[in-house]
Image (spheres, rainbow, N blue to C red):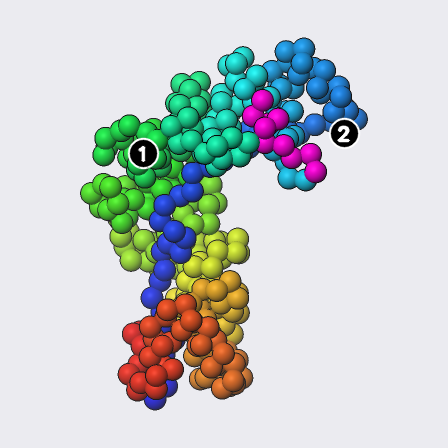
Amino acid sequence: MRFVVILFLVIFSAPAGADVGMGDAAAAALAAKAARDDAASLAALERAAEGGDVDAQFRLGALYLESGPRQNFSEAMRWFRRASDQGDAVAAYNIGVLYLQGNGVDPNDEAAAEWFFLAWARGSVDARYNLAHMCARGRGVACDRRDPINWLIEAAERGHLGAQRDLGRRYYEGDGVARDGVKARKWLGEAASRDDAHALNALGVMMAAGDGGARDSRAACAIFEKAAKQGLDAAQYNYGNCLFSGTMGRKDALGAVDWFRRAAEQGFAQAQFNLGVAYRNGDGVARDERLALTWIEEAAKRGHEPAKEYLRGSSASPPR
């Protein structure tokens, strides 16, 4: 019996919880402030910092964060503290990250939270985002069960990409809030409008299913393609499904196999299985039992049940 390529869509391939750490806006601010004139020597920067120039103090702290022989978290902390003493919000935020990650100091969630609250009071939306996740995980923040969602909403409304994406996921899954497809689609749409690959993929799944709004499979496939070209494995797999099923107008098995391969090479189990099935059946590639078995075994190693079933020699076909 011919095994059938699985054509269900995958919405979130990344872990549900976002990492607490350097946020979108803060990372951009760090990069911008750390940018330096190559003609300016470190000694000149140090003189300016010692003289009380807050921007020089921040830039010096940023230099000591950079990987390489100059990296020195203790020095980074020292200069960020001096910049923070003059009211720099991103410096305060970065001190919180150093405490959270235990770089240059002993890990201390409570101290990290205090610095994030200070940074938030000075306008750091990244700090609010981190506080929301610390609250949700019970890490160093006294809060009630509604605070994580409320704080994420505050950050999302102020344009924080990670918060917009995370709110979309939470409303989609009903994680800490009542499931709401309309709100999920709204916040994923906000993040997708900024070309975030995870949000694009998730929004595509919702559009394909008509979840939270109108159903439009062709538009969903166009969105998957956009995210797939950014290298997201789930989107590569989903776009491969679009091509294999003919959703774009006609079946393109050759194109589907190419996208399944890209996702499979990143370790995406569904794509590995589909690629193996394509080699077994000769869909888009020449039949090759050895390669078929290799990819199906890879999928089975990652816990893919249809792949395990195939290897057990079951005659039952996997779900369509």
Residue 282 located left or right of residue 309: right
Judge depth for marks 2 and 1 and give the one in front. 1
Question: Percent position (x, y) of residue 251?
Answer: 44, 73
Residue 182 located left or right of residue 125: left
Find out whether residue 74 is within the magenta segment.
Answer: yes
Q: Please give the name of the residue rendered at 37% of the width and 70% of the height, measured from the top-left corner.
A: 304
Note whether 157 is above or below 274 in the view shown.
above
Question: Percent position (x, y) of residue 210?
Answer: 27, 55
Q: Please state which amino acid type lies under the numbered disc 1.
A: Cys
Question: Percent position (x, y) of residue 247?
Answer: 39, 66
Q: Which of 133 and 70 is in front in this view?
A: 70
Name the residue beneath numbered marker 1. 135
- Furthest residue to the front? 106
Name the residue beneath numbered marker 2. 38
Magenta residues span: 69-78
Note whether 192 is above or below 216 in the view shown.
above
The crowding category of the residue bearing disc 2, from other C-alpha atoms within 10 Å (few below 14, some 14 to 19, many at least 20), is few
Q: Tell me the CA gap for discs 2 and 1.
A: 41 Å
Q: Which of 148 and 226 is in front in this view?
A: 148
Residue 34 located left or right of residue 257: right
Q: Identify the secondary structure beneath mark 2.
A: loop
Q: Please give the name of the residue rendered at 42% of the width and 71% of the height, measured from the top-left corner.
A: 301
